[in-house]
Image: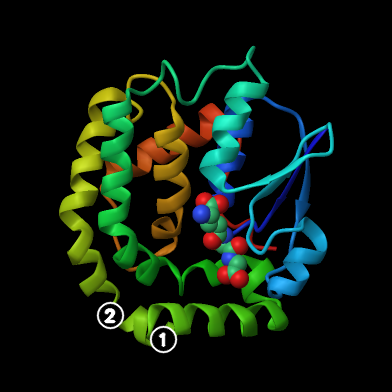
Amino acid sequence: MLTLMHFDFCPFCQRVRLALGYKKIAFAEQPVRFYGPEHFQSISGFDRLPVVEYPDGTRQGESLEIIAELDRRFLETPPLFRGSITDSEWESVQAWRARISGMLFRLIAPALTQYASLGQDARAMAYYRDRMENWLEDTLEGLRERRQEWYAGMAADLQEVTERVARYGFYTPVFSVADTLITGDLTGLRLLEDIQLPPELTAYFARVEAAAHISLLPTGG
Ligand SMILES: N[C@@H](CCC(=O)N[C@@H](CS)C(=O)NCC(=O)O)C(=O)O
């Protein structure tokens, strides 16, 4: 059986969980604690997660490369790339993601601590705080205070995707890799209690999760 090594709070890992769920590929889960590169290496052989181990023992990192490989290895399952999204649509999604990246991570970094594996594990929190604050050049508290500012900065880009998914159901008329990326990456926004997401976007997240037979939100325990 395929094994997925992942952090439950991680947007990139959530992309792969959505892909596996949508394809109905049975997999064993190995949740990993956010303790730092030595820990990740000792478990997965990689510095970053997600990492997948295939039944033949080979391991692979990089969420989008994993999803492409799932299409190649599991030909009988519905494709997430070829046939479900055109090259130019996929390029647009990636350009959109690149535009929002800085604002998105500043918004979601303080909120991902609502996942117990992070927020209730002091060792994970210490590494996470250090990692995020160095990368994003602000404290988690500062980021939280400037939340409305970051959200305003990405409002137009969010609206663009909201209109599109409201029109088509998914990013395109069928579930594709774009939906794993958009939903995985934006799920942290669903945790921002003082921000009201467009209802069409919330409905879309529910549609994507239903198609993949999973919930990405923290379970609270
Ligand atoms: N480009 C990679 C990014 C994966 C990634 O950055 N994962 C984060 C967790 S969300 C990680 O492993 N971070 C380890 C660290 O920051 O030390 C992918 O798409 O899989």
Work out which residue is located at the far left of the displayed protein and give it.
156
Tell me: 94 left or right of 61: left
Q: Is residue 58 left or right of residue 97?
A: right
Determine which quarter of the picture holds residue 126: bottom right
Above or below residue 114? Residue 213 is above
Task: Report the residue at 31% width, 83% height from top.
Answer: 145
Where, by quadrant of the figure, is residue 188 drawn? bottom left
Q: Calculate the distance from the C-alpha at mark 2 to the C-alpha at mark 1.
A: 9 Å
Q: Are marks 2 and 1 in contact (CB under 8 Å)?
A: no
Q: Nearer the viewer, residue 99 or 116?
A: 99
**Few, some or many C-alpha atoms within 10 Å of disc 2 (few <14, some 14-19, many ≥20)?**
few
The three-letter amino acid code for the residue at tag 1 is Glu
Instruction: Kindly give the residue lying farthest to the top in the view shown.
Output: 76
Residue that mark 2 sits on: 146
- What residue do we see at 20% from left, 36% from top? 163
Q: Nearer the viewer, residue 202 or 110?
A: 110
The reply to whether residue 192 is in sight is: yes
Residue under label 1: 141
Q: Which mark is residue 212?
A: none
